[in-house]
Structure formats: C-alpha cells, structure tokens
Image: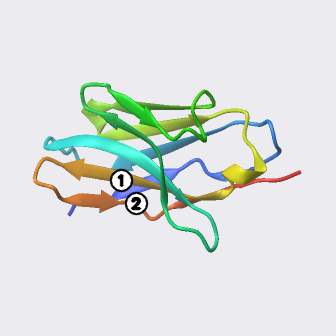
Amino acid sequence: QVQLVESGGGSVQPGGSLRLSCAATAYVSNFYTMGWFRQAPGKQRDLVATITKGGSTMYSDLVKGRFTITMDTAKSTVYLQMNSLKAEDTAVYYCKMTRYTGLDSWGQGTQVTVSS
C-alpha cells in the first residue's frame, strides 16, 4: 500500500521560511490532486493549498501570497514553500493525495512551529 511521507517541518522565527515535502513511497498514476492541510491544537484540520496534475492550484486566503505549492508528478511528490511565516501558521501539516477512484491517502503529519 502506498504511503505518503512528509518532511521539512521544524521551528522558525516569524518572517522565516520552510519548505515541506511529501513523497509517495511508490509511483501512483491514478491520482488527480495532492494538497496540504494543517491542524493547530484544539482546532479542526483546514485546507492550506491543493494542486492538480494539470497544475491548477488553490490556496487558503490565510496563506495566499506567502505559500507556494508545486508538484513533481513523475515522483508523486508535492512541495509547500512557506515564506513570511507567522505565529498563527504553527500547526501540524498533513499531506493528502486524492485518486480518481475517490480514495484519499494521508501522510503522518509534520510539525511546523513559528515562534520568537
């Protein structure tokens, strides 16, 4: 069974940058979108950004202009470049892959902490 493995989380000061990666453990041909979600303590999991195989992107208004999502379809890997980070960006970030069959796969999550 294909798994999603996230990396790149960590601690950074406000205004700093981080780049998250999410790679499938095997090539997946039948997915049509990958995305990033985040969940802060005591809050629901919210969408951050998504990207389709065709390259169409969608962003939460909270991150638009600061975060950039990209994808390497050949590697079934998605990236999230996060710039101008704020304390309110602190959360566990999860990667999700959605297949044409409707099946969703989630990564295990990676912690991002923005603090001075």
Q: Identify the residue shown where x is 33% and y is 43%.
A: 34
Q: Can you name the residue that lies furthest to the right here?
A: 116
| Farthest-out residue, front | 61
Q: Is residue 113 visible?
A: yes
User: How packed is label 2: few (under 14 Cα within 10 Å), some, or many (20 or more)?
Assistant: some
Q: Is residue 92 above or below residue 55?
A: below
7 left or right of 11?
left
Report how far apart the C-alphas of labels 1 and 2 lie in the structure.
6 Å
Image: 57 above or below 24 = above
| Residue located beneath label 1 in the image | 96
- Horizontally, residue 22 falls left or right of residue 93, namely left
- At x 60% / y 41%, what residue is drawn? 62
Residue furthest left in the image: 101
The three-letter amino acid code for the residue at tag 2 is Gly
Three-letter amino acid code of the residue under disc 1? Lys
Q: Is residue 2 visible?
A: no
In this view, the mark in front (1 or 2): 1
Going 27% across and 41% down the picture, which residue do you hit?
Answer: 33
Residue 54 falls in which quadrant of the image?
Answer: top left
As drawn, the label of residue 27 is none
**Residue holding disc 2:** 107
Contact, mark 1 vs mark 2 (Cβ under 8 Å): yes
Q: Residue at (62%, 64%) from the top-left corner? A: 40
**x and y percentages locating residue 19 in the rendered image:** 59, 38
